[in-house]
Image (cartoon, rainbow, N blue to C red):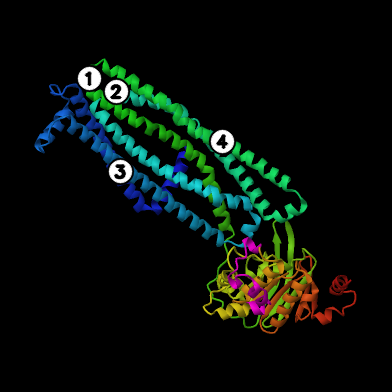
């Protein structure tokens, strides 16, 4: 019963969202049912004529049909009765096709809405949602489970259709021979009840199916993203084996689940036919008109596949519930991470960005940032340095609003960051992460993705400022060269310079460089460094640095350790501080 309530709730939710589509479907279903009933009735005069061409003792249906034919001046013969029967079957086929079209349209409209709303909810959440949840679960939900939900919405709509069809299909045999119909229904229901016990098994298999798909998708995603290191270590076979083992576990669950869904109608079909045969045998003994018995038998045999399909659909729906539960769980988790949006629009940085006693902790790492007080002044270059894990990149995330402080406050020109619409601030920020992500498109499209401009000179100016113009012009297709998935066709230095150009194209109020040169060779680092130096007096820059050579021209440097500031000052001041952490870092990098 709880499962039935859950299914009804899901169906109600989608029906309320798409009332027009479901209303059209309902009208088509009623019309199809009436045509189907007429098709069954059209068989009776055809059968009567086959048994007695003179129609000396016709059934009531045949008598009514003959009267209609005579009134419409239609000849009463084999061909007319045959065309009458075939015509209704043809119309029934057209209506069934229209119903299938309506169900598919509902399914894909709902699927489109689900995809859109789910992505909207996901992207309204902070970075913590993406970083703390399994990428495999998120990918599998969007790639497979959402499609499963869409398929099942089609199943639910189909089940709704089948119930209406079943009622109309059975109305004719009830009218012609109620006793035979009731006996068939009682026997079929008794046979069908045993199959309903499989609902719990179907639900359990669905949960295992979803869980194993999450794991397999996670391993596949990780394997493809780690292809370089897998090849470098010569561990191709281990990577393949790891995925195949996960896939085998998923395959085992999927096979069991799909076999159960397929088996139900196959086992029920002969039992349903048995119910109809038993009731036919009992009715023959009562000397009912043979043509009516044939029509009743035809109608019951047409209804039995629908009854069988209802059982199969019920099993499929119970199998799908875990997919919907996972989708709902992720959507709810994303809502828990929903960004704190203010009402103010950010236009321009006037004075500074300040951290006041800011603390932040990750779930498995306490005090990542501990009562931090720093100031990023307009028009200046502010640098954050320290060992790995000291909290440098977390500060950049906090400035962008990707994370929110556990305590303390972040101000922009004296106004809390949380009081601004987050994207109005981010749209004024240029961000270059340590691992620059380029999209599988041209350099031009990668630049325009960040900021749309009509003047191509602006694109080249951004490339020039990032020291990328020369190599871009030398490429076979220049600025229209495709960079490959995640920029794989470019070198690390080229990717970084394109990413910097992308950030600069926005003419940002704040430029954030998160260890932008840490993974580069000396030549590429020098080019990036030259770009940064040329920008140092033109915009506000926050630079997270591992290599201290990149922050020589910084106006102010904060040295971090365990999330706290342990030293601060200019490059010149800190490099003269005897026994200082900064000086020790500088010496270690020079040796």
Residue 396 image label:
none
Mark 2 or mark 4: which comes first in sequence?
2
Residue 161: image x %, image y %? 36, 41
Gap between marks 1 and 2 measured at Cα: 11 Å
The residue where tag 3 is placed is: 95
Mark 4 or mark 3: which comes first in sequence?
3
Q: 579 or 261: which is nearer to us? A: 261
Residue, far bottom: 537
Q: Secondary structure at mark 4?
A: helix
What's drawn in magenta, residue-wise? 463-488
The residue where tag 4 is placed is: 255
Mark 1 or mark 2: which comes first in sequence?
2
Query: Mark 2 or 4, which is nearer the eye?
Result: 4
Residue 469: image x %, image y %? 65, 77
Q: Secondary structure at mark 3?
A: helix
Residue occupying image coordinates x 81% and y 80% = 571
Gap between marks 4 and 3 measured at Cα: 34 Å
Q: Secondary structure at mark 2?
A: helix
- Classify residue 201 as left or right of residue 552: left
The residue where tag 1 is placed is: 288
Q: 503 or 466: which is nearer to us? A: 466
Q: 35 or 510: which is nearer to us? A: 35
Residue occupying image coordinates x 46% and y 52% = 111
Q: Secondary structure at mark 1?
A: loop
Gap between marks 1 and 4 measured at Cα: 48 Å
Residue, far top: 285
Residue 191 picture quarter: top left
Mark 3 or mark 2: which comes first in sequence?
3
């Amino acid at each position: 019963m709880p499962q039935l309530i859950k299914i009804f709730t899901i169906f109600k939710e989608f029906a309320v969202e798409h009332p027009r589509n479901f209303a059209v479907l309902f009208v088509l279903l009623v019309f199809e049912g009436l045509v189907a009933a007429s098709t069954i009735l059209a068989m009776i005069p055809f059968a009567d004529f086959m048994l007695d061409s003179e129609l000396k003792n016709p059934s009531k249906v045949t008598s009514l049909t003959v009267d209609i034919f005579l009134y419409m001046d239609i000849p009463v013969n084999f061909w007319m009765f045959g065309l009458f029967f075939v015509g209704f079957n043809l119309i029934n086929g057209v209506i069934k096709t229209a119903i299938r079209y309506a169900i598919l349209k509902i399914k894909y409209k709902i699927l489109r809405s689900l995809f859109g709303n789910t992505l909207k909810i996901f992207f309204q959440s902070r970075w913590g949602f993406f970083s703390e949840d399994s990428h495999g679960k998120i990918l599998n939900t969007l790639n497979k489970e959402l499609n499963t939900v869409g398929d099942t919405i089609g199943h639910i709509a189909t089940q709704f259709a089948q119930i209406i069809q079943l009622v109309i299909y059975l109305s004719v045999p009830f009218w012609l021979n109620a006793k035979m119909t009731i006996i068939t229904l009682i026997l079929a229901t008794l046979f069908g009840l045993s199959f309903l016990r499989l609902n719990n098994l179907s639900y359990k298999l669905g949960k295992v199916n979803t869980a194993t798909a999450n794991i397999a998708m996670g391993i596949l995603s990780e394997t493809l993203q780690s292809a370089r290191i897998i090849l470098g270590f010569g561990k191709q076979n281990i990577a393949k084996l790891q995925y195949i083992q996960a896939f085998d576990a998923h395959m085992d669950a999927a096979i069991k689940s799909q076999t159960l869904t397929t088996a139900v109608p196959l086992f029920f079909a002969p039992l349903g036919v048995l119910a109809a045969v038993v009731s036919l045998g009992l009715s023959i003994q009562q000397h009912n008109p043979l043509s009516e018995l044939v029509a009743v038998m035809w109608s019951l045999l047409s209804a039995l596949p629908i009854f069988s399909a209802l059982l199969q659909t019920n099993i499929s729906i119970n199998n799908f519930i875990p997919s919907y539960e996972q989708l709902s769980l992720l959507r709810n988790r994303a809502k828990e991470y929903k960004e704190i949006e203010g009402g103010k629009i950010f236009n321009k940085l006037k004075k500074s960005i300040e951290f006041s006693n800011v603390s932040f902790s990750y779930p498995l790492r306490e005090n990542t940032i501990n009562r931090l007080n720093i100031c990023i002044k307009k028009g200046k270059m502010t640098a954050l340095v320290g060992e790995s894990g000291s909290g440098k990149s977390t500060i950049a995330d906090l400035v962008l609003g990707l994370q929110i402080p556990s305590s303390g406050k972040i101000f922009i020109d004296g106004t809390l960051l949380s009081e601004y619409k987050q994207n109005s601030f981010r749209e004024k920020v240029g961000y270059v992460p340590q691992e620059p992500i380029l999209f599988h498109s041209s350099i031009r499209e990668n630049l325009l993705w960040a900021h749309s401009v009509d003047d191509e000179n602006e694109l080249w100016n951004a490339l020039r400022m990032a020291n990328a113009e020369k190599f871009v012009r030398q490429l076979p297709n220049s600025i229209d060269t495709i960079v490959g998935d995640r920029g794989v066709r470019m070198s690390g230095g080229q990717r970084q310079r394109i990413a910097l150009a992308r950030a600069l194209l926005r003419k940002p109020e704040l430029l954030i460089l998160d260890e932008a040169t840490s993974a580069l060779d000396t030549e590429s680092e020098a080019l990036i460094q030259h770009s940064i130096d040329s920008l140092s007096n033109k915009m506000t820059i926050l630079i997270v640095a591992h290599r201290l050579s990149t922050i020589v021209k910084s106006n102010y440097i904060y040295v971090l350790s365990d999330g706290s500031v342990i030293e601060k000052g200019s490059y010149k001041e800190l490099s003269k501080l005897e026994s200082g952490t900064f000086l020790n870092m500088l010496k270690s990098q020079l040796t």
